[in-house]
Image (cartoon, helix red, strand yellow):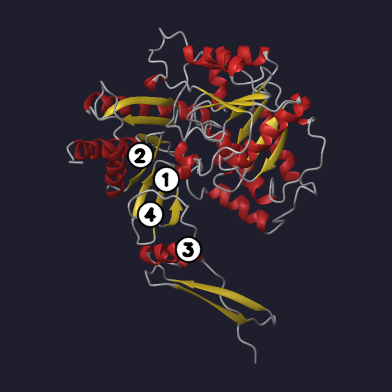
Amino acid sequence: MSQAPAPPFNPSSITAPGAGASASVHLGSDGKKHLTVVSGMDSAAVRALHKQYVMPATFHYYAESLVLQRGEGMFVTDADGQTYLDFFGGILTVSLGHCHPEVVAAVSEQLRTLGHTSTLYQNEWIARLGKEVAERTPGRLQQSFFTNSGTEADEMAVMLAKLHTGRQEIIALRHSYSGRGMYAVSAMGHANWRPIAPVMPGISLMPAPYCYRCPFGLTYPSCELRCADDIKEVLATTTTGQPAAFIAEPILGVGGFITPPKEYFQRVLEPVRKAGALFICDEVQTGWGRTGTYWSGIEHYGVQPDIMTFAKGVASGLPMGITTATPEVAASFKGLTLSTYGGNPISSVAALATLHVMSREDIPARAERLGGKLRAGLVALQDKHKLIGDVRGMGLMQGVELVEDRKTKEPASKRTNLLVEALRRRKLLIGKGGLYGNTLRIAPPMLVQESQIDDALSLLDSALSEVASAQI
């Protein structure tokens, strides 16, 4: 007599702490073998298993890593049952909050219909998503290539620029971050994130528009945008004068939410265009409403890119990278190419559902309004706490740079770590970044409520008071 089929695996039923996990194979009534996973792992057990089987290069926040198990809306719960208010959203990825019901429903239905095709076959969802992207991006951007991540999106953008121009050189910004591929590592603006020396030739890094720590020791606006004008020096001294592209983020995410002055891109792009180079705008973190008012962060600056890249929040956490370009640039890719998982039906439907909710909720306007409230609260905390040296950002993407002394601007890197730990104890999650690791990255899911912003500001106020007096 055959055994009854094992019950289906239900992750939401895993609640009890324990020492480990087990798996067993059962013979079902259909005569097929079925795998059942039974888990009772608490945080300590997960950490032990992770240490043994996951590469140590995987970076984690906190002295003792946080093991997440469930999420709903603005909240996540760890394997020990502790619930946290999430103001970082998986690095600006869970744009509508965790497990948004409309996204979950759309993905669940698609899983029952068609789960996977490679780009060797066409499907409705990737085409519809391409249309949605074209309708939301500035200028003549129209045709998209879909991949799995921001790294892949940026790598594709650079390849397109080189194919279109017939040139090889790329100009990027110091303090920038484009992912973990070979181009991205070569163009990395952070030594801490560069595991090997640059291997891709022809990349020049120009000074970042980092007003708080101006590389020229000047002050905006009397500086007259010296950082932007340095593009002329870069073109004349570190390139052949004929680069393929200039690539930049509207707000430098990993760089610590460095926000360029409003005139920056118009000033820097004039010499770039004159040199015959393209502009690649990296919207992996800023894209689709987060900076407020507009769908794309670059629209605040009144310029139009030739190529744009998106990832992270476009599909509410499912893997998705997008490289979109003008028709003539897109047509420059003459060789064969494909992406096995890029634009798969599951991620495409998640992105379509995400955009549907964003449009209905008018996310750009919402991010502008609630981002203004968040910014005002952070500025008020800056007036109260000397530890805060600078507050910057747009919409629901706000950075807070911590310093030991406002005059010397010595980075308060150790206190930043203490602050993040103090906020964890208060059940608030935020990000951190910047070259010196001293900038708080605050970017909640964009359906955040006003009361939750008030809660986060109150918790940050309390934690700042605690950390300011700590002996380090």
Contact between labelled residues 2 and 1, with CB atoms less than 8 Å apart: yes
Determine which residue is flagged by label 1: 74
Left/right placement of residue 297 relative to residue 139 reads: left
As shown in the figure, which amino acid type bears the numbered disc 1? Met
The disc label shown at residue 66, or none: 4
Identify which residue, 238 or 176, lies in the foreground: 238
Q: Position of residue 21 (x, y in %)?
A: 46, 72
**Which callout, 1 or 2, points at the residue further toward the start of the chain?**
1
Q: Label 2 to label 4, Cα distance in Å?
A: 21 Å
Identify which residue, 394 or 432, lies in the foreground: 432
Q: Nearer the viewer, mark 2 or mark 4?
A: 4
Left/right placement of residue 153 relative to residue 444 reads: right
Left/right placement of residue 450 relative to residue 130 reads: left
Q: Label 1 to label 2, Cα distance in Å?
A: 9 Å
**Which callout, 1 or 4, points at the residue further toward the start of the chain?**
4
Residue drawn at x 42%, y 19% as measured from the top left:
215
**Which callout, 3 or 4, points at the residue further toward the start of the chain?**
3
Q: Is residue 291 above or below residue 122?
A: above
Residue drawn at x 72%, y 32% as measured from the top left:
160
As shown in the figure, which amino acid type bears the numbered disc 4? Leu
Q: Quadrant of the C terminus?
A: top left
**Which callout, 3 or 2, points at the residue further toward the start of the chain?**
3
